[in-house]
Amino acid sequence: AQSVTQLGSHVSVSEGALVLLRCNYSSSVPPYLFWYVQYPNQGLQLLLKYTSAATLVKGINGFEAEFKKSETSFHLTKPSAHMSDAAEYFCAVRSFNQAGTALIFGKGTTLSVSS
Amino acid sequence: DSGVTQTPKHLITATGQRVTLRCSPRSGDLSVYWYQQSLDQGLQFLIQYYNGEERAKGNILERFSAQQFPDLHSELNLSSLELGDSALYFCASSPRGAGGTGELFFGEGSRLTVL
């Protein structure tokens, strides 16, 4: 079975600082991995995805993530935080059980950005 | 705007009642997924339908049921409601059942409050 673990339920950074949100995965097959963002009172929006092509994946709003098989990690980074980045971020892995294709989500990390 | 439409956006009801949540997927998408988001459980996958057929089940209670109609819209029925069913219910869609890169497109959710 596939699963993801997000380390840290809450991360606080200053505006302009590096953003690092951690995600480790467990999968018995080569994983498809995703990062989604959820702004207050909104649905989830795809930031980026890894589907076994390049290990460094670039997404929207300046975010990127690196797939590291040896560390079973898929951490999300952004060089310089902006106030508008404050939101909840979810790491997810695609399930391959029973022909279903649902995404299995981590518990989420709330990012706070201070001025 | 993801193209996934959910109604109603908010719903308040009493314990023991039954409600129906509706979802219209993106144009052309054949798969519909239902998720429940709560503070204690996070984002939980409930059920997936593909072109009218149930494809996969997650942590869906027996009091809950879903279906996908010929026009591809889906309904999630919640019965004998309990206080603990209060949550945000998301619908998501994707183009395929088992193929593709697996990303899901989420609606803005239906917030259910059970009093």
Image (tube, coloured by chain):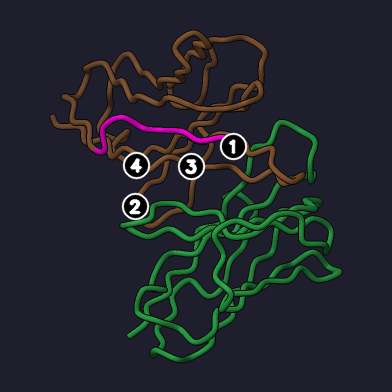
User: Observer-nearest residue: A17 or B45?
Assistant: B45
Q: Residue B49, percent across and down?
A: 74, 59
* Separation (CA) of disc 2 from disc 3: 18 Å
Q: Is residue A90 above or below residue B107?
A: above
* Separation (CA) of disc 3 from disc 4: 12 Å
Q: Earlier in the sequence, mark 1 or mark 2?
A: 1
Contact (Cβ within 8 Å) of mark 4 with mark 2 = no
Residue on which the image places disc 3: A105
Task: Give the chain letter for green.
Answer: B
Specify few, some or many for label 4: CA neighbours under 10 Å numbering under 14, 14-19, or 20 or more. many
Mark 2 lies on a secondary structure that is loop
Q: Residue B99, percent across and down?
A: 80, 36
Q: Earlier in the sequence, mark 1 or mark 4?
A: 1
Q: Chain of mark 2?
A: A
**Quadrant of the frame with the C terminus of chain B:** bottom left
Q: Residue B75, percent across and down?
A: 67, 73
The boundaries of the magenta stretch are: A1-9
Residue on which the image places disc 1: A1
Residue on which the image places disc 4: A88
Q: Residue B73, percent across and down?
A: 74, 67
In the image, what residue type sits under mark 4?
A: Glu
In the image, what residue type sits under mark 2?
A: Pro
